[in-house]
Image (cartoon, rainbow, N blue to C red):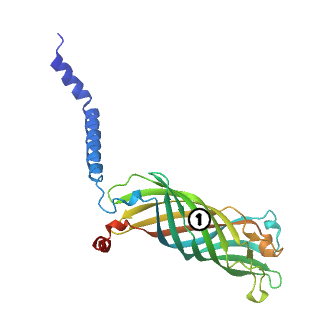
């Protein structure tokens, strides 16, 4: 005889683990919805996103580096045994100008200065005494930096908002040497103009009077920056591109209506 109660008991006993998983997923979804509902309230700078344009400044630390491509004749050279690049720390100062073109997109222009150093470590075989000598070239760079970037912003969660950023930049190396001073020892020359693409991510923190952001960005050079001079140091390299990792601390304009002294003067 068919019994509905027995059928349900049998179904529950066979699918107990499966039902537990469904209940667990439903609880997670409910808790997630409740958590995000708490973030819907905007506390600081509520009118910030309605500003069409705002300005600020960026302070950053960087590591400058090279991507080196050895020449096809590298293994046929009788002097240069190896070439290595050593990245060094530097810092950036940029002015931030931001144009909001959409709820989630903005165009950013950040002109500034980049200071840094990259070292080239050559191991050269000396035929005179049959030994390997190490030559360290310290290449200092001071860039005039002109990045044009697009920022994609997520929905604001209370006073936080993650974002992605990408675009391109032109850098002019003010420290690039037109001529090499022989008295300074072996040295290679770099081109003044660098073309780069940039990608990164960050998080906006909306404070009471201004917006603070942490941003990590990877800058990759497109053009070959090496100037060949037919010495053994440049013959070993076919192509050399600049690259940089930048950790930025950004301080951007506030909603002027939220400032206490402005309210008193109104």
Residue situated in front as seen by the camera: 199 or 53: 53
Q: Is residue 79 visible?
A: no
Q: Is residue 172 left or right of residue 1?
A: right
Residue situated in front as seen by the camera: 193 or 102: 102
Q: Is residue 157 left or right of residue 229?
A: left
Residue situated in front as seen by the camera: 127 or 26: 26
Q: Residue furthest front?
A: 266
Circle 1: element type: strand
Across and down, in percent, residue 190 comes to 72, 73
Across and down, in percent, residue 37 comes to 27, 49
Q: Is residue 214 visible?
A: yes
Q: Residue furthest top?
A: 1
Q: Is residue 3 left or right of residue 82?
A: left
Q: Which residue is mark 1?
A: 147
- For the N terminus, which image quadrant? top left
Across and down, in percent, residue 243 comes to 62, 66
Looking at the image, residue 2 lies above or below residue 227: above
Q: Residue furthest bottom?
A: 183
Would you identify the image quadrant in which residue 41 lies? Answer: bottom left
Looking at the image, residue 133 lies above or below residue 193: below
């Amino acid at each position: 005889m068919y019994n509905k109660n027995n059928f349900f008991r049998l179904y529950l006993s066979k699918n107990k683990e499966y039902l537990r998983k469904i209940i667990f997923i439903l609880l997670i979804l409910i808790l997630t919805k409740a958590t995000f509902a708490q973030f819907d309230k905007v506390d600081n700078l509520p009118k910030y996103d309605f500003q069409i344009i705002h300005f600020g400044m960026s302070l950053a630390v960087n590591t400058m580096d090279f991507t080196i491509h050895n020449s096809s004749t590298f293994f046929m050279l009788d002097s240069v045994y190896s070439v290595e690049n050593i990245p060094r720390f530097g810092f950036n100062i940029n002015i931030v100008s931001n144009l909001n073109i959409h709820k989630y997109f903005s165009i950013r222009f950040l002109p500034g200065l980049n200071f840094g150093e990259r070292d080239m470590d050559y191991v050269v075989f000396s035929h005179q005494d049959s030994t390997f000598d190490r030559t360290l070239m310290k290449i200092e760079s001071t860039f005039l930096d002109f990045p044009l970037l697009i920022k994609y912003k997520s929905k604001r969660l209370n006073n936080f908002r993650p974002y992605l950023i990408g675009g391109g930049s032109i850098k002019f190396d003010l420290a690039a040497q037109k001529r090499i001073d022989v008295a300074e020892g072996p040295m290679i020359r770099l081109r003044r103009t660098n073309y780069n693409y940039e990608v990164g991510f960050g998080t906006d923190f909306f404070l009471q009077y201004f917006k603070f952001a942490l941003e990590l960005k990877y800058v990759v050079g497109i053009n070959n920056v090496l100037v060949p001079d037919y010495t053994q140091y440049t013959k070993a390299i076919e192509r050399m591109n600049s690259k940089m990792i930048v950790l930025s601390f950004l301080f951007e304009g506030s909603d002027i209506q939220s400032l206490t002294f402005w309210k008193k003067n109104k």
